[in-house]
Amino acid sequence: PFVSAARYGKDNVRVYKVHRDQATGVQTVYEMTVCCLLEGDIASSYTHADNSVVVATDTIKNTIYITAKQSPVHPPEVYAATLSSHFIEKYGHIHAAHVKVVTHRWTRMDIDGKPHPHSFLRDGEEKRTVEATARRGEGIAIDSSIQGLTVLKSTGSAFHGFLRDEYTTLPETWDRILSTDVDSTWKWARFADVKAVEKAAPQFDEAWAAARNITLKQFAEDNSASVQATMYKMCENILGAVPGVNHVEYSLPNKHYFELDLSWHKGIKNTGKDAEVYVPQSGPNGLIKCEVSRG
Ligand SMILES: O=c1[nH]c(=O)c2nn[nH]c2[nH]1
């Protein structure tokens, strides 16, 4: 037997960084959870207990903090690219570094209608995530995501005309609740190096805002014939809005809310157009995935 694939490093490294604007006194905070995994000529550490090739995971953890101190941590794409490239540049036997940066929301508080200089709130567990892979001789691949943005619409969603056979019981519907946890990823054309990523820096926040706004607008306004049809429109619009991106993918759970027949109790009408009380389901859930690429 031989090692056919291997990568190792440190996961769940929590990082906080504050920016203090000396002129205005306004402070800005960033919080993220980082995973950094290395690939390279490391098989001997598995097969021969050869630790001489091992950049200790503790060393990787230290490097995550030092890089956060010495380089920008926002946009997360720049931080992830800087960190992943460091390992290729520093260690000749490491050929790829995979960095995942999950950023958490600290939204500035508005107090009495004014943005507060140093107070923030966690307005949702939605994450902005970046995965950057620096590979020797191949530049830097960056995927950006929105994850855990939970949405619901109380109408404007239908599902009918689907295949029916002896296994099918699902009734057709022209009016249903639609709820999902948005997991949207947009994949950037490869960057040659960190300098190219830094040059592109303004595009990353713009792309995130565009992807988030397009997702919410399409979700709200589309008279949805299915999760599939609506998510395709989201992908098309993001490709149209973000030139530096060549692929967009969504993975959307269909979080069902079942109608509840209460007619057994004094003839209560609570189904179809009379439905008001529903039963939210924890599972099973539909799961609809797609990737749409620039033609
Ligand atoms: O939007 C939907 N897509 C599907 O594929 C599906 N299957 N059951 N309900 C569904 N709703």
Image (spheres, grey):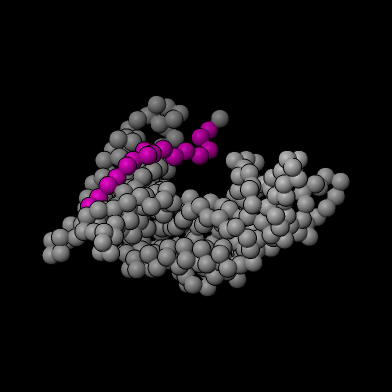
Q: Is residue 76 left or right of residue 5?
A: left
Instruction: Answer above or below: position of 58 versus 173.
Output: above
Instruction: Answer above or below: position of 50 versus 5.
Output: above
Q: Main secondary structure of the magenta part?
A: strand
Residue 40 included in the magenta stretch of the image: no
- What residue occupies the far top of the structure in this picture? 49
Foreground residue among 51 and 72 = 72
Q: Where's residue 198, x and y in %?
A: 32, 64
Rendered residue at 39%/43% (across/down): 35
Q: Is residue 204 visible?
A: yes
Instruction: Answer above or below: position of 254 versus 156.
Output: above
Q: Where's residue 114, x and y in %?
A: 25, 64
Foreground residue among 247 and 258 = 258
Rendered residue at 63%/44% (across/down): 279
Q: Where's residue 200, x and y in %?
A: 36, 68
Rendered residue at 41%/38% (across/down): 8
Q: What segment is highlighted magenta in the picture?
A: 2-19
Q: Where's residue 264, x and y in %?
A: 76, 40
Q: How many marks?
A: 0
Residue 6 included in the magenta stretch of the image: yes
